[in-house]
Amino acid sequence: MVGKTFYQPVREEVRYFVDKTTNKKYVVADLKLLPTPTIQPGRLSKTFKKSNIEVLTPEDPNFGIIIPEIGANARVISNVDASDEREYLQALQKGVSHAQGTAFPGEGGHIFLFAHSTDYLWNVGTYNAIFYLLYKLKAEDEIDIFYKGQRYVYKIIDRKIVDPSQVEYLTRKTNKEFLTLQTCWPPGTALKRLLVFAERVVE
């Protein structure tokens, strides 16, 4: 039970430590520039590997998330009912959940994504580890959301730890495109919620 509980958090911490020690960098692939059949596959990735850079291609270009700073890459399951425990626990085994009733990328509203939500300590290893390292993020770090084949870039502006009862962050209103990421805190518990806030970068 202990091994199951702490395997994923420890694995992510070790990977992050090794990445920082070796100065490894993650960059996001431009969907428009991905290799075509006429280009020798793997040439781009081999070039980057020589310089200790890894290219992250979205798990699902139709709805996916990449966070380069922590090497996170996962699909997003849309319209998950955050009040239905059975529904969201099933979704969290597949990827990150998009809260039903919140906006989608490009709509100019509030987008709410959550992952690693667990009820008991021994269940923590059951769900994906994509958001375990959210606490490593800082202001100006980048979050990339892919939606219907298009890339949307967000920059982190703040983060905070709140009580589970503070659901107003899920329903907040905004006059600009705003992204909230949520995970349980500390890892392996459901005591608190760690929220990361970001605004869309419009070029």
Image (cartoon, rainbow, N blue to C red):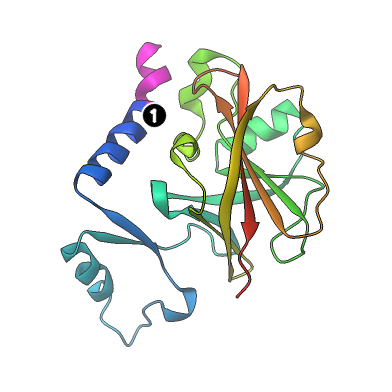
Q: Is residue 113 above or below residue 85?
A: below
The amino acid sitting under disc 1 is Gln
Secondary structure category for the residue under label 1: helix
Q: Is residue 163 above or below residue 144?
A: above
Q: Main secondary structure of the magenta part?
A: helix
Q: In x, y percent, where is residue 196? A: 59, 41
Residue sitting at x 26%, y 68%: 45
Identify the residue at the far bottom of this view: 38
Q: Toward the viewer: 92 or 51?
A: 51
Q: Is residue 1 left or right of residue 122?
A: left
Q: In x, y percent, where is residue 135? A: 48, 35
Magenta region includes residue 62: no
Residue 195 in sight from this viewpoint: no
Q: Is residue 54 left or right of residue 100?
A: left
Residue sitting at x 50%, y 19%: 188
Q: Is residue 103 left or right of residue 11?
A: right
Residue sitting at x 55%, y 36%: 93
Q: Tell me the residue that label 1 is attached to.
A: 8
Residue 25 in sight from this viewpoint: yes
Q: Is residue 2 left or right of residue 47?
A: right
Residue sitting at x 69%, y 61%: 105
Image mark count: 1
Magenta region includes residue 8: yes
Magenta residue span: 1-9
Q: Is residue 22 above or below residue 183?
A: below
Q: Toward the viewer: 58 or 179?
A: 179
Identify the residue at the far left of this view: 50
| Quarter assignment of residue 100 | top right
Q: In x, y percent, where is residue 81? A: 77, 38
Q: Quadrant of the C terminus?
A: bottom right
Q: In x, y percent, where is residue 104? A: 73, 58
